[in-house]
Every structure is written in C-alpha cells, then in structure tokens.
Image (cartoon, rainbow, N blue to C red):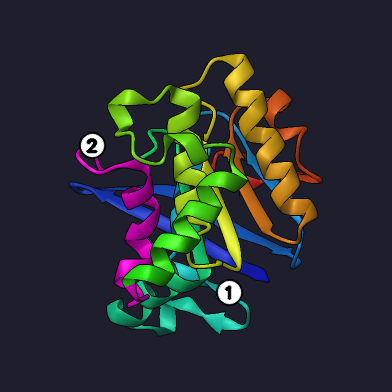
Amino acid sequence: MVEVEGLEKIYQRGKVKVPALREVSFKIEAGEFVAIMGPSGSGKSTLMNLIGCLDRPTSGKVSLEGIVTQDLDDNQLAKIRNRKIGFVFQTFNLLPRSTALENVELPMIYAGVPRRQRREKAQKLLSSVGLAERAFHRPNELSGGEGQRVAIARALSNSPSIILADEPTGNLDSKSGEEILAIFQKLNKEGTTLILVTHDHSIAEYSQRIIQLKDGKVIT
C-alpha cells in the first residue's frame, strides 16, 4: 500500500539547511493500522505530508499502491489526494458556514459525484459515525468529538485507499478521544488502511504497529 524508500526532506531557512527527515524507509501493507510516533520536531508531520502528497521530498521516494508520487505533476497529485487519501486533522478543518452534511459532501463535489448520489452517501457516512441526527448542524453547533466524527466521515467520502490522521485526538477530551480511536479501529477491521500520527504512546497503542521517529530518523 505505502512504500517509503530513502526519504529525505531538507528545509531552507535563509542560508541554513534544516533536515527534517533523514534516510527514512519502511513499508505499510494494505489493511494495516500503523502509528507514526515521536516527540515534537521528530519529523512525523513532515512524513505525513509527504505520504499524503501535500509536499515533495528532497530525495528518496514515496509509492502509493505502486505509484511513485514525486513523478507526478500537481494536477495528478491533487487527483490522488482526492481519490486515494482521506485526511483527518487535529483541528478538524471543517467549513464553518456549511452543515455537517455539506462538509462530508465536499470531496465528492470535487470528484464530480452527482448531487443526489453524494447526498445519500454523506447521510450514510454520518450515520456510520453516529451523527445521523446532527446532519444539518454547523460546526459551531457540534462538540469537539462530533466535529472530528464529521471530519472522519468526510475523509471516507470518496472511499479512499488510506486514511492519514494527524494528532486526531489532540483537541479532544479523553472520552471523546477514545470514541474517535474506537471508530478508527472499527474502520480498520472493515479493511481500511490507517496511518495515525501522534506523540502520545497511549494513543499509538490503539494501532497494530508503531514506527518511532527521532530527529528525522526511524529508530524502531
């Protein structure tokens, strides 16, 4: 599903080169639930951005389902992000003036899904995360846990091959966080490949395997 080989990312800060990732290599099989764990500054969010086609590496390569992503132009990368990858962020990234249902529909609009079809699917996805009765509420009318469940439903809207979750429980209380992680485990049991980025070992333990980063290198 995901193959990372000799991955390096160096940022230029004026005249100073700052290495964020150094010779990172690993594979993630289809259907795995993997946590990428490390302290702040270890390179884990940079790694997620590279896997998610949000950035390009300085050297090395990332392959998604056999497609080498750095060989693609910006339009091709955008198609991969929309069709193959679902993103869940710490801050939810919901459109504040749109309802939960409209937020879930958004990726399907970009994919050209007809209105009736995308509305039906969005309603089913909200039901699957326990939010059928909150479909017409806006983000400011939802709790943090409900907002993140809307974000998960949105991530699933185009039936992605993989879900990337960056500190998805970081803004939630412990009970809401446990509910979100239980949804991830359920999705994984149904066959979804999940990569969870976290600094918290208790969160990482929900996964099947942990990739530990330190100073931009894989240490375990």
Q: Residue 64 carries which label?
A: 1
Q: Please provide the residue range marked out in magenta.
A: 93-114
Q: In this rendered view, identify the residue nearer to me: 147 or 13.
A: 147
Q: Which amino acid does label 2 sit on?
A: Pro
Which of the 4 quarters of the picture holds residue 23? bottom right
* Residue drawn at point x = 68 percent, y = 59 percent: 193
* Residue drawn at point x = 61 percent, y = 58 percent: 24
- From the image, tell me which residue sits under label 2: 96
Q: In this rendered view, identify the residue nearer to me: 132 or 174.
A: 132
Whether residue 140 is visible to the viewer of this picture, yes or no, is: yes
Q: Can residue 101 be found in the magenta stretch?
A: yes
Residue 204 x, y percent position in the rendering: 71, 34
Q: Can residue 165 be found in the magenta stretch?
A: no
Which of the 4 quarters of the picture holds residue 169? top right
Residue 2 x, y percent position in the rendering: 64, 68
Q: Describe residue 3's horizontal placement relative to residue 76 as left or right.
A: right
Q: Describe residue 2's horizontal placement relative to residue 134 as left or right.
A: right
Where does the N terminus fall, quadrant-wise? Answer: bottom right
Q: In this view, does 185 lie above or below 120?
A: above
Q: Describe residue 137's horizontal placement relative to residue 31 as left or right.
A: left
- Residues at marks 1 and 2, CA–CA distance in whole angstroms: 32 Å
Q: Which of marks 1 and 2 is nearer the N terminus?
A: 1
The mark closer to the camera, 1 or 2, is: 2
Residue 180 x, y percent position in the rendering: 61, 33
Q: Which mark is residue 162?
A: none
Q: In this rendered view, identify the residue nearer to me: 18 or 40.
A: 40
**Badge 2: residue crowd in 10 Å (few <14, some 14–19, many ≥20):** few
